[in-house]
Image (cartoon, rainbow, N blue to C red):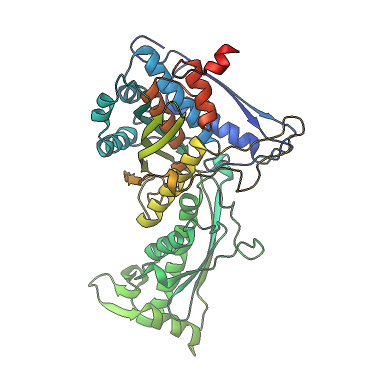
Amino acid sequence: MRPDGTYVARKLEMFSDQGAYASHGHSIAAKGMGCFAQMYPCPNVECDAYTVYTNKSVSGAMRGYGIPQAMFAYESHTDDVCKTLGLDPVAFRRKNIMPVGFRDGFSKNENYYDTFNQCMDKAIAYMDYWKKREEFKDQTGPIRRGIGLSCFWYNTGVWPISLEHSSCRMVLNQDGTIQLQVGETEIGQGADTAYAQMAAEVIGLKDYTDVHVVSNQDTDVTPFGLGAYASRQTYMCGFSITQTGQILKQKILEYAHELTRMPVADLDIVDSEIVRTTDGRVLKSLSDLATEAFYSLTHSVHITAESTYQIKTNAYSFGACIAEVVVDVPLCRCQVKKIINVHDCGKLINPALAEAQVEGGMSMGIGYALSEQLLYDGKTGRGLNNNLLDYKLSTTLDHPHLEAQFVENPEPTNPFGTKALGEPPATPVAPAIRNAILNATGVEVDDLPMNPKVLFKRFSEEGLIHDPWREEK
């Protein structure tokens, strides 16, 4: 570091324990490594990621595809740098974090907005951050409060972008509704609803409920897609839905030309009606057109469309999280009292689903930070707590109110202006909690989960607590 708080050089070594098989292992490590040079750009960076095979159970992708692990390391280190140099964590991030106009040479991602500052500003205002930083200075005593900040980086998908593609099939039903199939699957995240909303917008339907998504995870039946992971569905599928919807709309308007004798160029579909654009007159309902197309005695036709779109672009998702904690030093226990997660995921397709995604990610982040740990037998590699009784998930008693807010900066590379949201909410929570513990106690904690066992070790090493029995030994 330079004395002014800017980077001279940065280095990272990352090791991914994959167990017996790789699964997505090395791509997870590579993605976690990839954001190191991008989030805090520096001209001198050296990164190495290693996949290690062990006798443990097979490892796959945690929600966030390597980024929760990476963000814990990066953002914890960021606050450690600030503590060492006596710098303010917010000011340091504003000075060093990815600037507007930054473009990554590998992924070709570009930061089009002052997103990081916008997200930090929202989080700071909600948490009354500056007042609490002042209140929590130089604390002593057994019960201490702290507040901590973490920013985060995420990009859509995991493969080289030239391999990303999405296929879509649409059918006009007899009643004017649309049947929709894609290869990207609904796994409870609300994707089918978003697909219906996007299709309705492209075609010109009155309501997204007029789009019936055939959610079938059998790849012998659906168009081909690369799956439901890496927060790729809304962004990637938006391209194929747009392309296929435009093809279907053109076919509908060509059939409407036969029925109305109006030029196709003068026709449009608005609120499920065939409309003449020159004067706005409604010429025919889409349901009447569909019925005529199916049962016509002169020209009966089944109007369908199917296409594949190969995606050549990618998109950044950004945000910030601030957590307020209470640390019981003698009990070595941390409790989250207040938390906010602010995201720029582009234009919100469905705000209710977006908020639910963020709240779910925050819940996972709290568990990741404070309680969740898979234990192994050191000799055999056998899992010791591979059940939901002994594996300590966070519960409602461990949660404060989970505040989710958004900065809507439309993504210019996507037809709907949207980008990744499914996984990013889990990424910044653990380092925000960790940095709040640092603010409360002055102690850096570098191991997860930050449970009483880990906190006892660190508090003892730093002299916050004393164990006379051990000291006598």
Q: Which residue is drawn at 59% across and 44% down?
A: 163
Q: Where is residue 436 in the image (x, y as percent from the top left)?
A: 38, 29
Report the residue at 55% width, 58% height from top: 185
Query: Would you say residue 301 is visible in this rendering?
Result: yes
**Residue visible at 46% across and 50% down in the picture:** 235
Q: Could you tell me residue 443's position as x and y percent?
A: 43, 20
The quarter in which the C terminus is drawn is top right
Hey, which residue is sitting farthest top in the picture?
A: 3
Taking the spot 42% from the left edge, 26% from the top edge, the residue there is 329
Quarter of the N terminus within the rendering:
top left
Q: Which of 51 and 312 is in front in this view?
A: 51
The answer to whether residue 314 is seen in the rendering is: no
Q: Is residue 398 left or right of residue 47?
A: left
Q: How many marks?
A: 0
User: Residue 248's spot in the image, x, y percent?
Assistant: 46, 68
In this rendering, is residue 188 above or below 466? below
Comparing 245 with 380, the one in front is 380
- Which quadrant of the figure has residue 380? top right
* Side (left or right) of 205 relative to 300: left
Q: Is residue 83 left or right of residue 391?
A: left
| Residue 469 % position (x, y) | 56, 17
Residue placed farthest to the bottom in the image? 297
Report the front residue among 406 and 86.
86
Q: Of residues 351 and 473, which is closer to you in this image?
A: 473
